[in-house]
Amino acid sequence: MASPPAANLLYAALLLPPALVYLVVKRRRSSRLPPGPMGLPLVGSLPFIDRNLHVYFAGLAAKHGPILSIRLGSKVEFVVTSAELAREVLRDKDLAFANRVMPDAGSAVSFGGEKNIVGSPVGPKWRLLRRVCVHDMLGPAGLESVRGLRGREFRSTLRYLHSRSGEPVDVGAQMFLNTMNVITSTMWGGTIGSQGERAAVGSEFRGLVAEITELLGSPNVSDFFPALAPFDVQGIRRKMEGFKVRFDLLFDKIIQKRVEADGGGETVVTDMLETMLKLEREGGDGKTSFTMNNVKALLLDMVVGGTETTSNTVEWAMAEMMHNPQVLKRAQEELDMVVGRDAVVEESHLSELHYLRMVIKETLRLHPPLPLMVPHSPSADSTVGGYHVPEGTRVFVNVWAIQRNPLVWNEPLEFNPERFAEGDNVEGRKWDFMGNQFEYFPFGSGRRICAGIAMADKMTLYSVAMLLQAFHWKLPQGTQLDLSEKFGIVMKKATPLVAIPTPRLSKPELYY
Ligand code: HEM
């Protein structure tokens, strides 16, 4: 027979698992958490989550319903998967749910945390940052003032693609570079100097952004078990701090050049950097301060928030059109009518490209670049769908799944731009990017809606227009289109789209 201490241990081993299950169930009931997977003691559902988190969450919603809770490590998260509940979080209780829980990796790279837009809680600092960004820099007047810079970058991408005629091109990589160059030139115009210097900075940024978004999308023990955060078990914080130092050096160099040029009276520019440096010199707007770290954190927001989101959308649009040649043909016919082949498409043509605009909308419906948006979080205990949501809980809104709801969208998995034509049917509503309809909101909704919509709208349409008007596209022999997705903080194509451009314009001179 076992000795008394050994018997106690045996009883404890037998009783512990049911006791833990009982405690979890009791806690879930008493705190009125919504249903969700049970998970294991201590780690919750961590061992079961799929790399494609948006698909995994959609599967859980099919089983547990449109609002569910899931324990990941020591944290309980909520997932919302219906238009009605999205409206409750983003519209009806917009202010209550307008905060963020900054992931450990995010605060490491954001120049001291709460210095940027994405991570700041709603308050005077966030309001100032958004005003600078949305009104002063990315609003209609701000974007118009740098139209020439955008045109210059598009011409240079056009030239490059022409020089690669007949050869396979990584479409996403080229669009990333194009977007990056447009965003950086919008931010600091001609400060960098020679074309060579600009290209070098562009490619350094690309590498850094890719590494940062990769790490932001990686599961991090420090987030699931905040008590372990000081130990940085996976070294993610350390790597992020390293990236921050590299960004810091790059930004310092760019800012220094501008400050010297301003001091010598060389420049009279109206780019974003100038707007921000002016605010920094004034010390803020009287209500809240604005420091050099805010300048850098905002620059980082633009570079990280604006590049992959935009270039991945263009890559998906091209891939879907190559998969649906009748759509591609119709888009090119529209371009032939509006622009012809004796000229290069310009920004001034975009307002006439109605069909192509529907192509972009359909791309953002099927492949929203942020499938779970940026999670919102209540600043005090709140409720959603009648369930209690404790302060600081992360609430994921699965916009990817909502935009594929078969009760709203006919044949939701088909790529069908015509569904965005205006008409009487339910799909023919005036879908736009402003987050007013909770069946379609790829840019979010409410006060934290994307700060770069106007720029993203211009950039995606202009990029696809340029690619289609100036070139025919085909796949390299022996390759096939793969339309599968890879989840990350920004969703990508699982395999890059590699395609061969050949000239379509009437004269080679048009490309130069
Ligand atoms: C197709 C392109 C893009 C898509 C689909 C997109 C989508 C989104 C979404 C879903 C959010 C989160 C909204 C929420 O939390 O409710 C967001 C936030 C944000 N986006 Fe975009 N975005 C795009 C391009 C851009 C561009 C070009 C910029 C700037 C150059 C930008 C800057 C930002 C910023 C700063 C935020 C944070 C806003 C805040 O927290 O207040 N985005 N975006």
Image: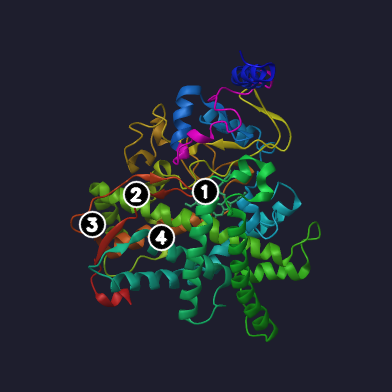
Q: Secondary structure at mark 4?
A: helix
Q: Secondary structure at mark 3?
A: loop
Q: Earlier in the sequence, mark 4 or mark 1?
A: 1
The residue at the far right in this view is: 286
Q: Tag 1: Cα neighbours inside 10 Å, few (<14), some, or many (≥20)? A: some
- Distance in Å between CA atoms under marks 2 and 4: 13 Å
Name the chief secondary structure element in magenta: loop
Q: Amino acid at mark 3?
A: Leu
Query: What residue range appears in magenta?
Result: 28-54
Front residue (pair 8, 378): 8
Front residue (pair 105, 262): 105
Residue bearing mark 1: 217
Query: Does 331 appear in magenta?
Result: no
Residue bearing mark 2: 355
Front residue (pair 44, 3): 3
Q: Earlier in the sequence, mark 2 or mark 3?
A: 2
Q: Amino acid at mark 4?
A: Tyr
- Distance in Å between CA atoms under marks 3 and 4: 22 Å
Residue bearing mark 4: 462
- Tell which tag, 1 or 2, sits nearer the viewer: 1
